[in-house]
Image (cartoon, grey):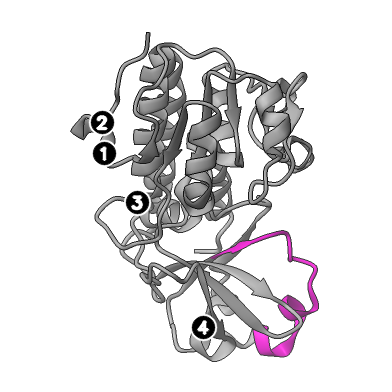
Amino acid sequence: MGAPLLASAASDVVAMQSSTLPDHPLRIVSLDDLTTEMLLSLGIEPVGAANPDAYRRQGKPNAEQLENTVSLGSPQQPNLEQLVLLKPDLVLGISSLHTGLFGRLDALAPTLIYRVSMAPSSDDAIDAADAMLRHLAALTGRQSQADAVLNRMYEAIREGQQMAQNLGVAGQPLAVLYPLSIQGRFIVSNEKTLVVSLANRLGGTNPWPLREARNLHRRIDVQALAAEDDLHVLFIGNFKASALFRSPLWQALPVAQHGQYGFLETPYWSFGGAETATGIMREMTDVLDGFQL
């Protein structure tokens, strides 16, 4: 017999849910990579998931555990007929993708939609990852697993902060940018994205903060970088060999002349759980260690 989970402690992380959820559900469906990652980090293989092949292909955390998970199609349009055949105890989704599907999902199985939003708030993506994982761990009886995952994340963050402090990066302009190398422009991500939240935890100051609920990204041009004399940049993606970073224009920029930049090889950065955060922060720490300061 299940119990309602409408207590105030859950209100910040839960956007929508069925009136009653099962105690310690075993057959769980995840409709997006974030809830898939959370389940896997708790040692739970979902019986069905949206795009498990893409999750494996991108090398996301614990992808090897998706041995018997049935594909339910895309996160935006999951195969509900296949979902019904799996007879799940619980369906998990996120508000940015599945709010409009809640009524149909709720009619098929107990459903829980976690809140994922770019709306400005005092919490960042790290706080959200912590709260969601703890909530799911309490629901599934996996608190000890969640504690271990979160301890690793916070240890990685502390190591990154210490590195930033030792190198004098803390308090200095620090940006995470995705280079559009052919255009000579750069993508700035929202403050609530995982990669920017992690960079902010290093103690730098973001020269181009994006705090608009409906905008995940915006673009800046090379002149914006030229205007920052003591800029430090973590570039997303392995663009080291790009012609842009060999060009006279790039070499003339202060950030290039000071050697205060590097490349994160992670293929995902906007959203992710605690294990993704741990991996990205370790990459950031390694890249900072290679800055020419």
Q: Which residue is mark 1?
A: 11
> Callout 2: few (<14), some (14-19), or many (20+) C-alpha neighbours within 10 Å?
some
Classify mark 1: helix, strand or loop: helix
Which residue matches tag 3?
Answer: 124
Tell me, yes or no, if residue 158 can be seen here.
no
Q: Secondary structure at mark 3?
A: loop
Cα distance, mark 2 to mark 1? 7 Å
Q: Are marks 2 and 4 in contact (CB under 8 Å)?
A: no
Q: Position of residue 90 (x, y in %)?
A: 51, 23
- The amino acid sitting under disc 1 is Ser
Report the residue marked by disc 2.
6
Cα–Cα gap, marks 2 and 4: 47 Å
Nearer the N terminus, badge 1 or badge 4? 1
| Viewer-proximal residue among 222 and 105 | 105
Q: Amino acid at mark 2?
A: Leu
Earlier residue among tags 2 and 3: 2
Report the Cα–Cα distance between label 4 and label 3.
25 Å
User: Residue flagged by tag 4: what amino acid is it?
Assistant: Leu
Query: In this image, 201 relative to 257: left or right?
Result: left
Mark 3 Cα-neighbour bin, 10 Å: few <14, some 14–19, many ≥20: some
